[in-house]
Image (cartoon, rainbow, N blue to C red):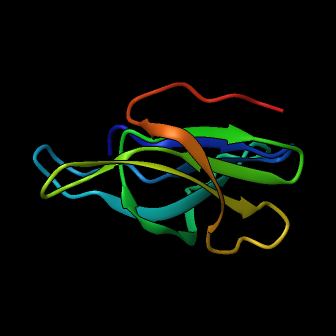
Amino acid sequence: VHRASSQNSDTNGYVSGGRTGPPGSPLDDIQKFPFASDENATNVGNLNYARYGNAGSSSQSRGYMHGGGTFSPFNTHDDISAFPFATDAAAGYPAVLSNNRWIHGGTQG
């Protein structure tokens, strides 16, 4: 998987989106792995659509993915999607960026 985003809670790391390949296909999964032990990641939810080149950010309670691209044809996106750390649920779509973004940086809250 490459061009995925990452997020973290106090106890777990998360990887979301990305793509297989190249050329590959965009992915729509959210995977979680614990910091306290050497366990494999598990799929805990899905993004609202498959994407890669998206950035990841974290708050105390949620993981966020913003921007990214899909293909074919190639399109960039302006959405901000979020998933709750407490319930391992699918990502929702709470907001948008001011412009479409692809391969950009994320932040931590």
Residue placed at 43% from the left, 53% from the top? 17
Residue placed at 55% from the left, 56% from the top? 40
Point out the image quarter for the C terminus: top right
Count of marks placed on residues: 0
Percent position of residue 18, x then y? 37, 48
Q: Is residue 55 above or below residue 44?
A: above
Q: Nearer the viewer, residue 79 or 18?
A: 79
**Residue 78 horizontal side relative to residue 7, left or right:** left
Percent position of residue 57, x then y? 67, 38
Percent position of residue 68, x then y? 40, 44
Residue placed at 37% from the left, 54% from the top? 51
Percent position of residue 36, x then y? 80, 45
Q: Is residue 7 above or below residue 108?
A: below
Residue placed at 80% from the left, 73% from the top? 87
Task: Looking at this view, name the residue that lies furthest to the front.
Answer: 98
**Residue 65 horizontal side relative to residue 77, left or right:** right
